[in-house]
Amino acid sequence: MNKMFKNTVITGLQLFMALQLPGRPPQDSVAATAEIWVDLLHPVRGWDSEDIANLQRAFKRVARRADKFPAPAQVIAAMEPKIQVFKALPRPPKTAAEKQEISRICADIARMLSGDTINNAINKTTTDEDKV
């Protein structure tokens, strides 16, 4: 088990004990209380450095509002949710029909840029006007 995690739990419990909150465990059972808290909190996270910092903040949040000795559930509830970043999946390969459609669109754009479509439209307009 992560030593930094255990030390954080012990420090948090020392904070609660120093506040002399009602319902605190007797002084001679603090070590047993710490072991119970470690066992209850350990499965909650992986306890990397971000989790440890989050736990430290949670102990302080609970201590600021505590009017009696808190339970581990209160510290867990005070922890910020862990943000997980997932990599996007790669785009699936294009189907033959999609490739053909893209080629057709590119060819249309190339014709427009080369002026063929514009020249054809101008010629058609001119021819139509000559008939009138």
Image (cartoon, rainbow, N blue to C red):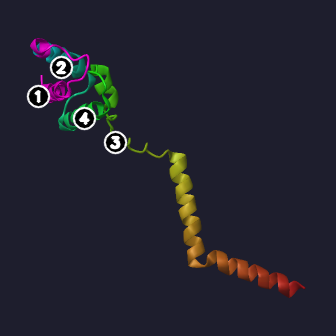
Question: What residue do we see at 26% from left, 31% from top?
Answer: 63
Q: Which segment did they paint magenta? A: 1-30
Q: Judge whether residue 122 is colored magenta.
A: no
Residue at mark 2: 38
Q: Where is the N terminus found, in terms of image quarters? A: top left
Q: How many labels, in total?
A: 4
Q: Secondary structure at mark 3?
A: loop
Q: CA distance from mark 4 to mark 1?
A: 15 Å
Q: Which label number is shown at residue 7? A: 1
Question: What residue do we see at 30% from left, 28% from top?
Answer: 66
- Say which of 72 and 83 sits in front: 72
In the rendered structure, which amino acid carries the disc numbered 4? Lys
- Say which of 36 and 50 sits in front: 36
Residue 119, horizontal then vertical, whole percent: 67, 81
Which sits earlier in the primary sequence, circle 1 or circle 2? 1
Residue at mark 4: 60
Q: CA distance from mark 1 to mark 2?
A: 10 Å
Q: CA distance from mark 4 to mark 3?
A: 33 Å
Residue 123, horizontal then vertical, whole percent: 73, 82
- Say which of 63 and 127 sits in front: 63
Q: CA distance from mark 2 to mark 3?
A: 33 Å
Q: Residues within 10 Å of mark 4 (few under 14, many from 20)?
A: some
Image quadrant where residue 109 sits: bottom right
Most common secondary structure along the magenta stretch: helix
Q: Is residue 3 above or below residue 90?
A: above
